[in-house]
Amino acid sequence: MLEALKNVLLYGGSFIFVLGMVVFVHEFGHFRAARLCRIAVKSFSIGMGPAVAQARDRHGTTWKLGAIPIGGFVSWVDDTDPSSIGPATEEAQQLSHEEARERGHFRAAPVAARAFVVVAGPLMNFVFAIAAFAAVVLIVGRDMTDRAQLSPRIDGVMANSAAEKGGIRGGDVVVEIQGQPVSVFGDFQRVVAANPERQLNLVVRRDGGLASLTVTPTATETPGPDGRMRRIGLLGIERRTLPEERVIERVGPIGAIGIGAQQTWSIVAMTGAYIGEVFAGRASPEHIAGPAGILNESGRIASRAIDQTDVSPWERLSDLLLSLLQWAAILSVAVGIVNLLPIPILDGGHLLFYAIEAIRGGKPLPPQAHEWALRAGLAVLGGLFLFATWNDIQRFLNPGIG
């Protein structure tokens, strides 16, 4: 019972913390850009549903905390719904264009101002990611540890994994694989990865003696640096890096920002390559994750930090916060990329509408065309959500392959 309660708090708490941070950053980008463009903000909400807490600032904006801790929104004074996709309020429709612009109505703002407000959300996600990665590097240093050169010790075995089925235990040290001596962890990894679904003979050192085992790595596909899928073998083991094994390089603020920008761009480039390979039919979309996948990974990250036994409680708390901050940075990049996709409903879809409006000399799309585009966007997003959730379920049903 206590273990179940601990998991609920760890998984649920870390998920809400990370997702709330990413959503706040995104919506704050829209909010600040609107203030700069003198667009009146009606409400700023983190979470959906009825407000459990709210307050109004001196500009008339209501800040809310929603009862459902997923998502968030910024709405304008001329909005009829939180999504800002509906028509303007009846009061706004009765005003002249000049009067509406004077009152800070979003729909009356110049197309360039609206585009800036919309794009500011994803851009703030990228800025946050750079800052978060930089903060982690600045605090703990740059990890230069070559994990491939660590000793071939196995620290953990996933339940129902190929390793568990083959008799591998935590604490085993691999001595030999397929008759070849193993001196470093990278030697072991390379052979396992190159032999999916093939029996491999192992010799491990255990309790002062040697044990012979036979394992069959599970086959899985994973995107490579170019976004293309590779079929590799996995056992479902964990090799933890002990503090004394780490090689840490200290960097200054400027260097940390550079590393943060480099890490952010690396994620953007790899994600872009992967999406391109999926549309080209050369990569599988099975790695697209949904909310359930984010929940699971957030909980796993939190559990790894909390369950450490060789560090003090303060070090565990520090590691927890830094790990979740780094995970939030990764998610922030993903949110920024997804929101820039040219799908109606998303920020990228709004930017597409504004581009069409600019090309048409300031004339927006006819209401009927706009409505059908939004319906199509909702259908696409609904399909993506269901597909991502299906992927999450498949990963839960097939543990031990990652």
Image (cartoon, rainbow, N blue to C red):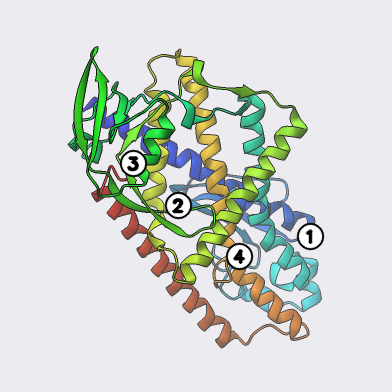
Which amino acid is tagged 1? Cys
Which residue is at a point 64% across and 25% down the rendered structure image? Answer: 139
| SS for dot 4 | helix
- Do the residues bearing badges 1 and 3 touch, measured as CB atoms within 8 Å? no
Is 364 located above or below residue 1 in the figure? Answer: below
Residue picked out by circle 2: 50
Left or right, 135 with respect to 19, comes to right
Residue picked out by circle 3: 192
Residue picked out by circle 4: 347
| SS for dot 3 | helix
Which residue is at a point 56% across and 69% down the rendered structure image? Answer: 80
| SS for dot 2 | strand
The nearer-to-camera label among 1 and 2 is 1
CA separation in Å, label 1 and label 2: 29 Å
| Quadrant in the picture for the N terminus | top left
Residue 259 in picture, x, y percent from top left: 68, 38
Closest to the observer, 129 or 37: 129
Residue 165 in picture, x, y percent from top left: 18, 37
Sooner in the amino-acid sequence: mark 3 or mark 4: 3
Which amino acid is tagged 3? Val
| SS for dot 1 | loop
Which residue is at a point 75% across and 64% down the rendered structure image? Answer: 104
- Do the residues bearing badges 1 and 2 touch, measured as CB atoms within 8 Å? no
Which amino acid is tagged 2? Pro
Residue picked out by circle 1: 37
User: Residue 172 bears which disc, if any?
Assistant: none
The answer, for residue 62, to whether it is visible in the render is no
Sooner in the amino-acid sequence: mark 4 or mark 1: 1
The answer, for residue 179, to whether it is visible in the render is yes
